[in-house]
Every structure is written in structure tokens, then in C-alpha cells.
Image (spheres, rainbow, N blue to C red):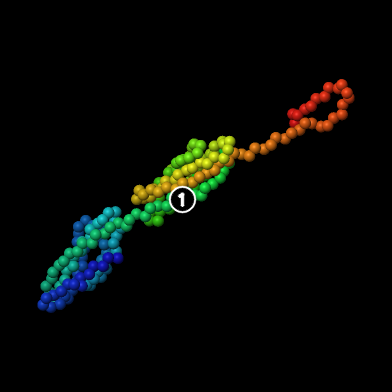
């Protein structure tokens, strides 16, 4: 809210009987003046892309009908951009060969919108990231012989082209080895000098 005040206007040989506020036409957007016929008027500063000059004229009339004018310029600045918030999610664990989701959907922008997402890998065995330009991306965990940590970076860009990053680690473990089953066949009784077959095929 911007206050325009003509309170210091005076009349040397009488009194001010009327006030009139108007906006000068200078290419700036028109605003709605509140109480334009009182000593003080006001308006709501509009949203602007860059610093914009708004010019207003005060016309005063004295008790004998004489008038005079004075102009005032109000420079309206855009609000400073608040950086977006990148949220790549918490660190996770998975098993080799499984599809793993990268979730950046909790990212936000306090004073606008997030226009672009970008997932990149910054560490570990290289994988292919699917839908790397979306809030939700995915990859297939690689075949590993031991525990491997894969690191990813999420970059988000807001509608004012400001960017921030967040990173997440995905720990990939090998599938646990299952011990083999041993079957040496059934116990047998044989005669001496008889050939005996020992079979482990089961």
C-alpha cells in the first residue's frame, strides 16, 4: 500500500478547499487510486517485472477557486526472487537389478513455480536415468559384487531462472547368495567286491 500525501499544501492568503489526485499517463500500468479527492490518497503497488516509475499529480484549489499542481513519482521495484527448494529425497538402499525411483516431488518454490528438473549421476557405477527431466526419475540398479553407493544430483529451476541443487545416495547391495543343497543319495548295503555308484546328481 502506497500513501500519497498532500498535507503540506498551503494557501498564503486563504485555505485549500479541494484536492484532486490523478495518475499521469507515462506508459506505466494504471492503478486504482483510493480517496483521490482527499488530502491523502493511496494505491496498491502492482506486480512489475522491473523497476517502474508511476507518476501522480495533485491539483489543489483554494477558497477563491485558484488552482495549482504538483507531481510526484513513485518507483515500484519487483520483489526479490526467493530461491526454490530442491528436495531429492532421503538416502535409500536397494538390491541389484531392481528398479529404483528418484523422487524430487517434494521440491517447491515459495514465490513461484518450479519450471525445470534435472537429474544427473555424480558417483558410483554409471547407470541410465529414465525421465531425468521430471520430478520422478528412475534407474535399474547395476549388477554388483559388493555394496556400491550411487550418488545423484537434482537441479531445480524456478520461473525466475534461479537454480538450486540437492543430492541423494542410493546404496546398492548384491543379492545374498543361497547355499547349495547337497544330496549324496540313500544309504545302501552291498556285497564285497560289488561295484558301487555314488550319485550326487540330486
Mark 1, residue position: 87
**Image location (x, y in percent) of residue 30:** 25, 60
Residue at (13% x, 75% y) in the render: 11
Residue at (40% x, 49% y) in the render: 164
Q: Is residue 34 above or below residue 46?
A: below
**Image location (x, y in percent) of residue 64:** 11, 76
Residue at (48% x, 40% y) in the render: 123
For numbered disc 1, what is the local secondary structure? loop
Residue at the extreme right: 191
* Residue 162 seen in the current view: yes
**Image location (x, y in percent) of residue 117:** 42, 46
**Image location (x, y in percent) of residue 56:** 20, 64
Q: Residues within 10 Å of mark 1 (few under 14, many from 20)?
A: many
* Residue 132 seen in the current view: no
Compared across the picture, whether 1 is left or right of 63 comes to right
- The number of callouts visible is 1
* Image quadrant assignment for residue 192: top right
Q: Nearer the viewer, residue 52 or 83?
A: 83
Residue at the extreme bottom: 14
If the image is split into quadrants, where does the N terminus sit? bottom left
Q: Nearer the viewer, residue 82 or 22?
A: 82
Residue at (33% x, 56% y) in the render: 80
Amino acid at each position: 500500500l502506497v500513501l500519497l500525501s498532500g498535507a503540506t499544501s498551503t494557501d498564503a492568503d486563504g485555505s485549500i478547499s479541494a484536492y484532486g489526485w490523478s495518475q499521469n499517463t507515462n506508459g506505466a500500468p494504471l492503478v486504482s487510486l483510493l480517496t483521490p479527492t482527499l488530502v491523502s490518497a493511496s494505491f496498491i503497488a502492482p506486480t512489475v517485472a522491473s523497476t517502474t516509475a508511476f507518476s501522480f499529480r495533485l491539483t489543489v484549489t483554494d477558497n477563491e477557486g485558484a488552482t495549482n499542481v504538483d507531481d510526484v513519482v513513485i518507483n515500484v521495484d519487483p520483489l526479490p526472487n526467493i530461491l526454490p527448494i530442491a528436495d531429492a529425497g532421503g538416502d535409500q538402499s536397494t538390491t541389484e537389478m531392481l528398479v529404483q525411483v528418484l523422487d524430487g516431488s517434494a521440491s517447491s518454490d515459495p514465490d513461484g513455480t518450479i519450471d525445470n528438473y534435472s537429474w544427473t549421476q555424480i558417483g558410483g557405477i554409471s547407470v541410465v536415468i529414465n525421465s531425468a527431466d521430471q520430478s520422478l526419475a528412475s534407474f535399474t540398479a547395476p549388477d554388483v559384487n559388493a555394496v556400491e553407493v550411487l550418488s545423484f544430483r537434482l537441479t531445480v529451476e524456478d520461473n525466475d531462472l534461479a537454480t538450486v541443487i540437492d543430492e541423494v545416495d542410493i546404496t546398492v547391495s548384491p543379492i545374498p547368495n543361497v547355499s547349495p543343497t547337497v544330496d549324496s543319495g540313500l544309504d545302501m548295503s552291498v556285497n564285497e567286491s560289488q561295484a558301487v555308484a555314488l550319485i550326487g546328481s540330486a
